[in-house]
Amino acid sequence: MMKRIAAGEIGDVVQVIASFGKAAEHVERLVRKDTGGGATLDMGIYTVQFATLVMGGDKPLKVLAGGHLNKEGVDVVASASLVYPKGRTASLSTTIRADLPSEAFVVGTKGTIKVSYPMWCPESFESPSGTYTAPLPVTGQTYNFNNSQGLMYEAAEVRRCINAGLLESPGMSHGESITIAEVMEQMRAQMGVI
């Protein structure tokens, strides 16, 4: 997808739209403050990371967020608008109360890229030049979410970096990780999560 964007296929990026939501309030660790629960930290990170990736690691100029907390003060529904330099924005939604489409869109001045469900670990995306697929290995195991076996690529990259003596992955810098954490913390603060 990033190669298609870099090639100018959709023109200048104007908007990112991403959602990730699953009916998961029955999962105790997600609804409790003492276990670090909440939609933003658990699922929302994928939408924030997607926006950060598309925006080239840029920090948003402004984060506007709202949502709802459960009786323990944990966010169970969250939406955010991120305002970026160069006339770009992102609209992000996450929840542990219901199944959202869990897709992502990158809208440009010349076209749109649609990242198919599940956006956190997709096997395909559609762009003006066609549909691109990269099937994940079939493992026969059940995971928390669809396509979770795709997270093995993150684990392999961590191993590669450790073996190479690297302190960070060239594909995901510390700075980008900090940007993602700062955006999520701003979202949570604006919703009243303490």
Image (cartoon, grey):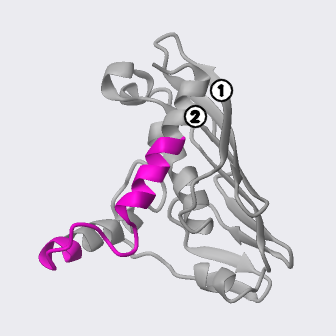
The tag on residue 187 is 2
As drawn, 48 above or below 3: above
Which residue is at the front of the view, 29 or 47?
A: 47
Amino acid identity at mark 1: Gly
Over which residues does the magenta segment extend? Answer: 160-183
Q: Residue 167 colored magenta?
A: yes
Left/right of residue 17 with respect to residue 102 in the rendered view: right
Q: What secondary structure is found at the residue carrying circle 2?
A: helix
Give the quadrant of residue 2: bottom right
Which residue is at the front of the view, 1 or 28?
A: 1
Which residue is at a point 62% across and 30% down the rendered structure image? Answer: 77
As drawn, 15 above or below 82: below
Q: Please give the count of numbered marks on the rendered protein.
A: 2
Q: Residue 180 colored magenta?
A: yes
As drawn, 99 above or below 120: above
Does residue 118 show up? Answer: no
Which residue is at the front of the view, 49 or 121?
A: 49
Amino acid identity at mark 2: Met
Q: Earlier in the sequence, mark 2 or mark 1?
A: 1
Quadrant in which the N terminus appears: bottom right
Q: Position of residue 126 (x, y in %)?
A: 72, 77
Label 2 and label 1: CA atoms lie apart by: 9 Å
Q: Can you tell which of label 2 and label 1 is closer to the viewer?
A: 2
Q: What secondary structure is found at the residue carrying circle 1?
A: strand
Disc 1 designates what residue?
Answer: 67
Which residue is at a point 64% across and 53% down the rendered structure image? Answer: 102
Binning the other alpha carbons within 10 Å of mark 1 as few (below 14), some (14 to 19) or many (20 upward) gives many
Left/right of residue 179 with respect to residue 105 in the rendered view: left
Q: Position of residue 81 (x, y in %)?
A: 71, 43
Which residue is at a point 44% across and 59% down the rendered structure image? Answer: 176
The tag on residue 11 is none
